Amino acid sequence: MASSDDDFNKFDTLSDDEYLVLIEKFYEKNANNFAFPHLDLEKKQRLVTELFSRLRSFNSNATHLCLKTIRLLTRDREGLDALTGSSVLEPLQKLAGLECTKVDVNPVDVQNVIEAQKCMSNLIYMSPAVQKFYSVSGVADAITQRIKETTATKLDDGIRFFDMRMLFLLTALNADIRQRVREKFHGLSYLFEIINQIMSSRSEPVAAADSGVTLSNEDIDYLIEILKTLYNLTVDLPNLTHSYAIQEEEEEGHLMRLVSILRELLLCYGPNDEKQMELRNHIINLLTNMPKTCFEELLSPAVLEDENGNDEHNGKNMEAINIILRFLDHRITKAEGTKNAKEALLPVLQLLILMCQSNRTIRKFCRQFILPPLGDEVLNLPTEGQKLRNKLTRMMTNPNSELKTLSAKLLFVLCKESVDRLIKYTGYGNAAGLLYDFGLLGPQHNTNKDQYSSDSDESDTENYKKIRDQYGIDPVTGRVNVKRHEDPTEGWTEERKMVEVDKLIHTLDRAMTQGLIKPMVMDPNGNPIPAESVLQFREANLLAQHPDNLRASESSDDEGDGGQSQANKPT
C-alpha cells in the first residue's frame, strides 16, 4: 500500500477483496517496522476506521490479517490516538473473549483471540487512556474469571500467556484492580494452583536433571508472567511491612504457601542456564515482597539419604538458599563493573539481608558460604580473588551508593553486626563507608546484639592464628603486614647519591618554573604561601622535619655571638 492520499481516499470504493489485497501489501511491507512516519494521525484514523467497519463481514482469515495490521500500528506511539477510542477498544475486547458480561472460557477462533490480545497488550502498555478504559470495562475481572474457570481445563497456551501479560500490566498500573483481583476473585489462590499444575505436569524424572522438574521455554515464559503478576498483587498488602509479626492469620497462611511454592520452583530446571537464571531472577524479585516470618518455608527437613551434604545445615535442607547464593555469585560475576549492575544485584542483596536478619539457620548457612573461617586468604587483600567474599568486598567501594550500602550491610549482618568482625573480613578501609553511615566510627558496639544468637561463631583457623601471630594483621587493609622493601639506595656511593639529588632538584626547579607544580610553605603566622624557590621549599621541609635541631642550632649560634660580643666589651 502506498502512502499517497489517493490510496486512503479510495478505501470506500474498494470491494472487500480489493481492500484485503491492499491491506496484505501494507502488512508485508511493514511487518518489521515499529514506526510509520508516512502515516499521520488523519491517515491512520482513516485506515483504522475502515478496518473495523469491514471487520464484521470478514471471515476468520481476513479478520486475522486485519488484526495483525492493527497490531503493527499499536507499536508506534505517534498517532496512537487513532487507536484509543471505544470504537477500537470495545471490538478488541470482544474478539479477545474478555467482555465482562460474557467471558469466553473456551475460545474456538484461537488465532484471532491471540491477535486481539496482542493488540490490547500493546495499547495498555503504550496509552494511559487505554489503561483507564480497560480498567473500567472490567478486562482484569474477565481475565481472572477465565483463569478461575479454566484452571482445571486446558486453555490454549498462547491465550493464557497473553491473558496473564495483560493482567500483569493492569495490576501494575492500578491499585484498585490489585485489590479486586486479590480479594473479590481470590486471584492469589488460582495463580498458586496454576504454578503447581505446571510443575506437576512436568514432574517426570529426566536424565539430564537426575530427579527434578524440567520446564520448557513456554512454561518458563508463562511462569514469569505469573510471578510478575504475583509481585504486583503482594507489593502493597496492608501488613506486608517486613515486620516480625503478621496480624492477619489468613494472609500469613497465603504468603507462607506462596514461599513454599517458590521454593519448589527454585529447584526446577530450565532448558538452558540462561532461561533458568531468568526464572530464578523473578522468583527472587517476588521473595523480596514476603514478610520475614515466611522465610522458614524456604527450608525443608534434611533427608538422611541425601548424598549432597553441602545443602544440609542444622537438620534442614538448604538447597533453595544455596541456589540463591549461587545466583548472587553468578550475577556479580556477570554484572560487576557494568551499567546494569544495580538492576541486576539489588533484589538478591535485599533478599539475603532480609533472610539473614530474620532466620538464624539461614544466616549461619550464608555465613559459611560467604565468610568461611579465614586461613591463607589473609595473605592477600580482601578485594583480591574470585570468592564471594572478595566480590562483595569490592562492591563495598562501588560508585553506586545503593549497591555499596547493601553489599556492606549483607556482610555486616553475616558478622552479627559486629564492627570488629566486619573489619577482620573486609579491612577497615573498605568498611569505613558503612561504619560512617551507621554511626559506628566511634566506640565499637553492636546495636542489635539481642537480635542474634549468643553463641560465638569462631572464625579463626589454626593457620590464620599462626599467620597472625607471626606477621600480624593490618586492620586497615585486612591482610598480613607487608614487609617493607629494602632501602633502594643501599650500596650507593656518596657521589652517586649527590648526582641523584642534583637531578631531583633540577627536575623540581624546572617543574616549579613552568608552573606545573606549586609547592607551599608556611609563613611565620602559620599560613600556606607558594614557595619562591627550591631552596625555600627545602628549608621549610627541614624545619618541619627537625624543628628541635634547628632551634638548638639557632640557640647555639646566638650563645656564640653573645660570648664574642661579651669578650670584646671594654672592661
Image: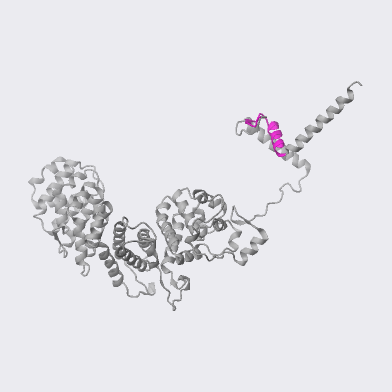
> Is residue 295 in the magenta section?
no
Relative to 201, 421 lies left or right: right
The quadrant the C terminus occupies is top right
Q: Residue at x 21, y 49 (%)?
A: 132
Q: Is residue 162 visible?
A: no
Residue 308: give x, y in percent of width and height. Answer: 46, 74
Q: Which quadrant holds residue 161?
A: bottom left
Decide which of 241, 529 is in the foreground and name it.
Answer: 241
Q: Residue at x 46, y 76 (%)?
A: 307
463 to the left or right of 372: right
Q: Is residue 409 left or right of residue 225?
A: right
Of all residues, the one furthest to the top in this rendering is 570
Q: Which residues are magenta?
A: 525-545
Question: Which residue is situated farthest in the bottom direction here?
Answer: 305
Q: Is residue 396 visible?
A: yes
Q: Is residue 535 left or right of residue 427?
A: right
Number of marks present in the image shown: 0
How far from the left and from the top, in percent, is residue 558?
81, 29
Along the line of sight, the residue nearer the viewer: 380 or 500: 380
Colour scheme of this structure image? one colour
**Residue at horizontal 24 percent and vertical 64 percent from the top:** 157
Name the residue: 32% across, 73% down. 203
Task: Tell me where residue 123 appears, x and y as whole percent.
Answer: 22, 50
